[in-house]
Amino acid sequence: EQIMKSAILISGGAGYIGSATVAYLISRHQPVVIVDNFSTGHRDAIHPQAIFYQGDIQDESLIDLICQRHHIESVIHFAASALVGESMIHPDLYYVNNVAATACFTRSLIRNQVRRLVFSSTAATYGIPTSMPIVEEEPQHPINPYGRSKLMIEQILDDYDQAYGFRSIRLRYFNACGAYENWGEDHR
């Protein structure tokens, strides 16, 4: 198996936004490693030039192996449950799949000296905005478990920055839509 230096790790790289990001990074000649458990991702979304590990971000021994084998310095974290309606019916899935899983994942990253993370958050952390357009400084008052789970992760990341120097950027986008070449959103 090929061993890379300074690859970017993409969690959820077989998903809709993750696979488009992987394709973009590879088009820019950036080595990419993907970890995905296929809970919502798809095998045919895996870019052929990326190194792929099938597994869960809560599997700290797997994340340790990936970080050490590929000298991971940066991560883009897309792995999460992401349906607002489902979060209201099954909030437990969102707190386990999003919050608990990310806590395990970031613990392994920190242990392996990874100090940079781009986090796929959501505009749902704002809840009902007080003004439009929504600005980044808008108070965050989520109104569903999905938004609350993402805000909890943002708060954890703040604490990890203070304690460990674990730097993060949060992307609070609204509805992502479109397609990358022959690949688009697929909830099957």
Image (spheres, rainbow, N blue to C red):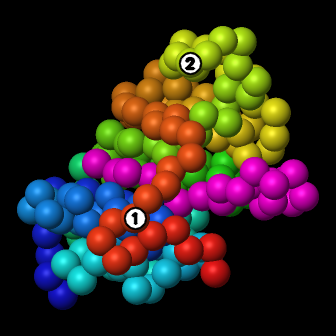
Secondary structure of the residue carrying numbered label 2: loop
Residue pictured at 17% horizontal, 65% vertical: 26
Q: Which residues are magenta?
A: 74-94
Classify 39 as above or below 161. Answer: below
Where the N terminus falls, by quadrant? bottom left
Residue 35 falls left or right of residue 50? right
Residue pictured at 38% horizontal, 51% vertical: 76
Amino acid at dot 1:
Ala
Amino acid at dot 2:
Pro
Q: Is 11 or 84 nearer to us in this picture?
A: 84
Which mark is drawn over residue 133?
A: 2
In percent of width and height, residue 15 lies at 48, 68
Residue 75 magenta: yes
The quadrant where residue 23 appears: bottom left
In percent of width and height, residue 78 lies at 48, 55
Residue pictured at 58% horizontal, 19% vertical: 134
- Kindly identify which residue carries mark 1: 179
Residue 78 visible to an observer of this rendering: yes
Residue 88 falls left or right of residue 155? right
Secondary structure of the residue carrying numbered label 1: strand
In percent of width and height, residue 71 lies at 20, 60
Dot placed on the residue nearer the N-terminal end, 2 or 1: 2
Classify 45 as above or below 23. Answer: below
Label 2, label 1: how many angstroms apart (C-alpha)?
25 Å
How crowded is the residue under tag 1: few (<14 C-alpha within 10 Å), some, or many (20+)?
few
How crowded is the residue under tag 2: few (<14 C-alpha within 10 Å), some, or many (20+)?
few
